[in-house]
Amino acid sequence: MFCLPSSSSLLLCVLAAARRGVVPVLLNATLLQAERDALIADADPALVVTEPSALTPLLSGPAVDLAPYPLVRPMHYTSGTTGRPKGVWSGVLDDSDARALFEDEADLWGFSDRDTHLVCSPMYHSVSVRLAGAALLRGGRVVVVPRFDAAVAVAALDQFEPTTTFMAPTALQRVMSESGRSDHFATLRLLVHAGSPCPVALKRSVLARVGSGVLWEFYGSTEGQFTVCSPQEWSERPGTVGRARPGRRLEIDEDGLVWCHAPGFARFEYWRDPEATARAWRGDAFTVGDMGRLDEDGYLFLDGRRDDLIISGGVNVYPAEVESVLAEVPGVIEVAVFGVDDDEWGERVCAAVVGLRDEDALRRHAMARLAPYKRPKEYFLVGDLPHTATGKLRRRDLPGTLGRVSPDPDTGS
């Protein structure tokens, strides 16, 4: 188990372990001691590494034979925004499945020995190891930023001239604010984003700054990958997260949940949680609790998580839909829609907005674009929003953060 900041040494140790069939477990290095201890107890690892210096003997030991591809997926813990963190475990793969899993990622993005991949996101975020490992094992070069800082990321773009990188939308927003010139992105053939909804205004801004065909998106999770979306596809269908990745098929059930029929090498379990595993799988299809809809051509549009659903006046309100509309207002950097208990409505729709200080502009835009039941009844103009370490919005924290926690009916407190 590794609980360390990102580094090239950490990446090499993780890949070496995976190519020996040893499952590396990656934790957030900023966890408090009690949080870390709880996950260590849950994972029950054979070795725990919490100091960067401890990587040196692991890398300088005697040579051993390594498989050409990782035989395991590293175990990452989900962010825990909808409950306690759960380890995503895939066991040891046979040679055929190991190769298929590796090529599923490497072929999709076309990694080759001509690539330099820039790692900006932390390695306990599963996409970091997936993409960096694919680039490295295809003969490319990898540059690792130890922790995300917009100025450092822009400097790395200039100094190392990467051809590929991944950035979550929150990181992309900060890099765009830090970077005043298009030539910062001149060497990129591939800039991928995922992890949370990307505001339409930000997406259009990045598209205008990078080269043609560079800005791609995917929808996936720690558990597995669902879609991929090219710049052209998004431009033709703004808001989509794309169509099913190769070898997969999407469907929406009667409750609006998104299910992905996945190949055998993509199967997973929740570590020591058979009940959660059973809820996630239906035959060869899995869900992570997100809701969405498919258009006639199979393009997926997400409506948010089922757990985020707001029921106001007996009608379903999907935060992602309202957020997408409010993000169109000039000056909005980020927006989060959430519900709080309300005696009249059951739940009251609220919005926290970063960047814009004009509540009237938000209300006017909502009135023009949203049905009355979807319009926020209360706005909070804030400096920032709470996020997990991987950039996902902590929506459940918003009522408490903004002082809008409903009184306890039993205690009145």
Image: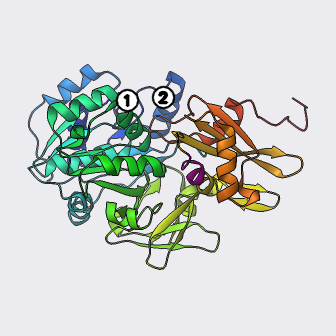
**Left-right relation of 70 to 341:** left
The front one of 256 and 357 is: 357
Contact check, label 1 and label 2, Cβ < 8 Å? yes
* Residue 369 is inside the magenta segment: no
Quadrant containing the C terminus is top right
| Label number found at residue 409 | none
The amino acid pointed to by label 1 is: Cys
CA–CA distance in space, label 1 to label 2: 8 Å
Residue at the bottom extreme of this rendering: 296
**Left-right relation of 412 to 84:** right
Extent of the magenta region: 323-329
Q: How many marks?
A: 2
Measured from the top left, where is residue 262 in percent x and y?
39, 69
Going 63% across and 74% down the picture, which residue do you hit?
Answer: 254
Residue underneath mark 2: 36
Residue underneath mark 1: 3
Query: Of the residues under marks 1 and 2, which one precedes in the sequence?
Result: 1
Measured from the top left, where is residue 154 in percent x and y?
27, 31
Q: Quadrant of residue 27?
A: top left
